[in-house]
Image (tube, helix red, strand yellow):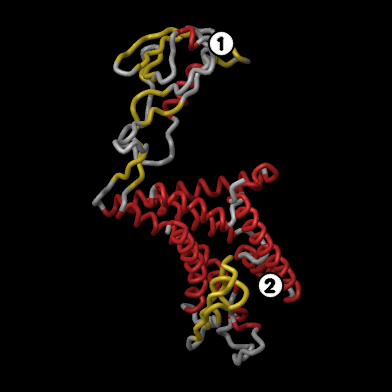
Amino acid sequence: MSVLAVILLLAVLIFVHELGHFLAARLQGIYANRFSLGFGPIVWKYQGSQTEYALRALPLGGFVGFPDDDPDSEIPPNDPNLLKNRPVLDRAIVISAGVIANLLFAYLVLVAQMGFVGLPSIQYNPGALIPKVVSQETAAQAGIRDGDVIVAINGQPIPFTKPETSTLEISTEATSALREAIESRPGQPLNLTIQRKSERVNVTVTPKDDAGKGRIGIQLQPNIKPQPDGKLAYYKRSTNVLQIFSWAGEEFQQNVVRTVQGFGQLISNFSKTADQVAGPVAIVATGAKIAESDAASLFNFASLISINLAIINILPLPALDGGQLAFLLVEGVRGKPLPNRIQESVMQTGLVLLLGLGVFLIIRDTVNLIPQ
């Protein structure tokens, strides 16, 4: 059921994207004669008064078709309601509407999560946890043990994220403050106050000088308070409508920033990150695991995938919305569009490459899921 739920979710995201294009055209009075989910042979279709609605065999996307270059269309080629006869701005609205629809949907999904499930939250205890002492020198000699929690250094409490803070972005406030204090004092004795189960102990440790930075041979991680069910996260509820929309806005902003940063790292270091590109099969598998462990997490998963879909489509690549917007930008600068043969050649090449990449990712991800 979790796999079917994720497949349905991806279909909804594609539908939302194409619906954005379709509504942007129809609301401006522009003809749209096809609305398809998928590519290739038609599996099911319904002919409406103006538009053919269809499901196609290859579930790798979808498209909204326009009668501008349809040889069977009875609409005169100079009709002002054909997409190609509209001003650049009208066409830009239609092309960018899919991206806008995905971003809006991503935000509304988070609003639904905050309203019905709550804000995923993490509760912190004071101090920084030492999961492991990695060196038998310095820290071990000073008496520091695995599982100790450093709560103060030289009598000054370590700052930490307050328990009421609500976010799944793991805070490194405490670990960063402690790490900075240790690294900035090589060779200088430090008095550490440690919480060890139910008792507090004080130890003195002198960081070793490692290329100008202090080291005491410990790992650090935030001191997160587990919930009664053993999970680290819980859901914080609110009946304040404004608070719900505010939480959704903050989470949406974080998701956009994370997605943009991820694409930036992929582009800047492609040779090392190319294997991290996920196709439909890998996305479904990941979503299914999330659904099995915590179905409520599917809200945030849906938001992230919708944002990813929006950002991918806005990239200035052939066969994507960004590529068509690039053509419109050139037209706006030149005062006339590029020749049709050039546009068609670029778009067809881009479509073939895009479908080829989709098939490759499906095969690769399927093989990776097969037990070795």
- 172 over 34 or under it: above or below: above
Element under disc 2: loop
Percent x, y for residue 168?
Answer: 41, 41
Percent x, y for residue 243?
Answer: 30, 50
Quadrant into which the N terminus falls: bottom left
Percent x, y for residue 119?
Answer: 34, 47
- Residue placed at 60% from the left, 55% from the top? 366
- 125 over 63 or under it: above or below: above
Residue 304: numbered disc: none
- 165 over 26 or under it: above or below: above
Quarter of the view holding residue 173 = top left
Give whichever of 33, 42 is nearer the camera: 42
Q: Name the N-terminal-most of marks 2 and 1.
A: 1
- Residue placed at 46% from the left, 64% from the top? 8
| Residue wearing tag 1 | 208
Q: Residues within 10 Å of mark 2 (few under 14, many from 20)?
A: few
Residue 335: numbered disc: 2
Tell me: 177 left or right of 90: left
